Amino acid sequence: MNDSVDLGRRIENGALSKDMAGQKVTIAGWLQDTRNLGGIAFLLLRDRSGIAQITCLKKKLGDEIFTHLTTIPRESVLAVTGELKLNEQVSTGFEILPETFEVLAEAQSPLPLGIIDKVGVELDTRLNNRFLDLRKSQVLAIFKLREILIRGMREYLVSQKFMEVTTPKIVAAGAEGGSTLFPIKYFENQAYLAQSPQLYKQMLMGAGIDRLYELAPAYRAEQSDTVRHIAEFASLDIEMSFIKSEEDVMHLLEGLMTHALESVLKEGKQYLDELGVEVSVPKLPFPRITLKEAIKMLADAGLEVKGDLDTEAEKKLGEIMLEKHGAELYFITKFPTELKKTTFYAMRDASNSVLTNYFDLDYRGEELVSGGQREHRIGILINQLEEIGYDPKDFEFYLQAFRYGMPPHGGFGLGIERVLHMMLRLPNIRECVMFPRDMYRVVP
Ligand code: AMO
């Protein structure tokens, strides 16, 4: 009985069906749970596609084999061959009566983390044992939804003729301010981990790749230990040429978000149900409010804001936009130049140079996206670099691309984890990354 099982014949649990009644099948996975009732025992075997019940009858198997099967530690990897038999009492409608089995890898016990126990476990313990944590169906559901969301975004961008590109993550200059740069030793020189593909996506506009996107890690040495910041995040960046204004970019972003959320609803229902969350597809167009209007709305609600919106103000604005405008997603536009100082590449408003053509997209009070129209005229771009004290020489590789025909262009950067964080109403953004990086965590 305890022979080797031919894994070449393995069928995924999800592919088993009642039509296979009477057939011999081979399954393999993790032993999730064992219920031993004396003469009969039920083993639940889990793989990525589902759970199958293995029903062990002591009389049929004999004492020794029954005892062996029912004492295999939880979460061991087990392969079983046996007959598929219909049984209406099982949720799937069938069970497997084992004929041969093999313990492929025994799990140590106790487990550092229960897979099916309902006891609340600290996020840190879960992240320290992430390979086990990811075995939980509710945790895996987040990543199934992440995959569906990203697939929906890619689908949309491909349909809009965007080309996927890959730009370097080891770079010589930062694009998003010095304070969040990770310096690295690069042979005999200093380099940095890329905070954003900003300079490269713009250079590629000069190369004539007039609609591009990149989905890649971006690095920020965030000194703030918050539930919405991580040091490595998945950034979806787009850039497009021949725009009339940032409105063209915002229009694309509306289409992208709507399509991606529709995909999540269509393909991810089972995972949303598992997490007990409802997602709604936003109505078009998303409301647009200027930063000035946002500050006024907050003041009317009793919250005085000076300068930029902090976390509290963003949250409050999220509540106001939901209550008063029924909007979960909304644009905040016309950021003052003063607040986008480090954003030297931002085009200023032609009619009012104290404002930029820059916007954010917020989702229930959290910023998902920043973007806008870029400054493509080299003289002005150099002035803007100098204004904030940067030496244009350090950006010469970038500026060169503006000297030989750079079309008007714009784009945005979207944080994938931020979308998931808000969409799934998770308490912490770290839930949306398999192996998150933050100020204190670099393992596992
Ligand atoms: P920005 O710096 O606003 O803009 O970043 C764009 C988006 O990236 C996400 N994000 C983060 N997510 C998690 N943890 C972090 N520490 C973190 N930092 C940023 C947010 C944010 O809205 N080059 C510009 C984009 C552009 O103009 O194209 C940029 O990087 O969702």
Image (cartoon, rainbow, N blue to C red):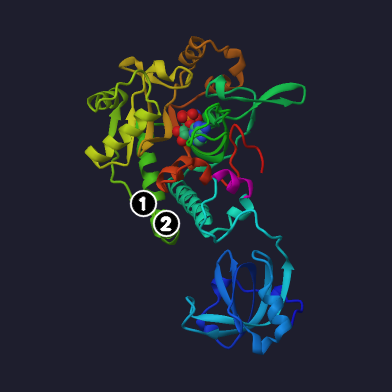
Residue position for label 1:
279
Q: Residues within 10 Å of mark 2 (few under 14, many from 20)?
A: many
From the viewer's perspective, tell me whether residue 133 is left or right of residue 239: right
Quarter the C terminus occupies = top right
The answer to whether residue 428 is seen in the rendering is yes
Q: Is residue 225 above or below residue 336?
A: below
Of the numbered discs 1 and 2, the one sitting upstream in the chain is: 2
Residue position for label 2:
272
Q: Residues within 10 Å of mark 1 (few under 14, many from 20)?
A: some
Residue 115: image location, x then y, percent: 57, 59
Q: Is residue 403 above or below residue 197?
A: above
Query: What amino acid is found at the position of numbered circle 1 in the picture?
Result: Val
Question: In this picture, which residue range is highlighted in magenta?
Answer: 123-129
Does the magenta segment cover residue 333? Answer: no
- Most common SS among magenta residues: helix
Residue 131: image location, x then y, percent: 63, 53
- Mark 1 residue element: loop
Question: What's the residue at 40%, 56% (across, down)?
Answer: 276
| Residue in front for this viewpoint, 282 or 137 | 137
Quarter the N terminus occupies = bottom right
Residue 80: image location, x then y, percent: 67, 76
Q: Are marks 1 and 2 in contact (CB under 8 Å)?
A: yes
From the viewer's perspective, tell me whether residue 370 is left or right of residue 432: left
Say which mark, if any, is on residue 78: none
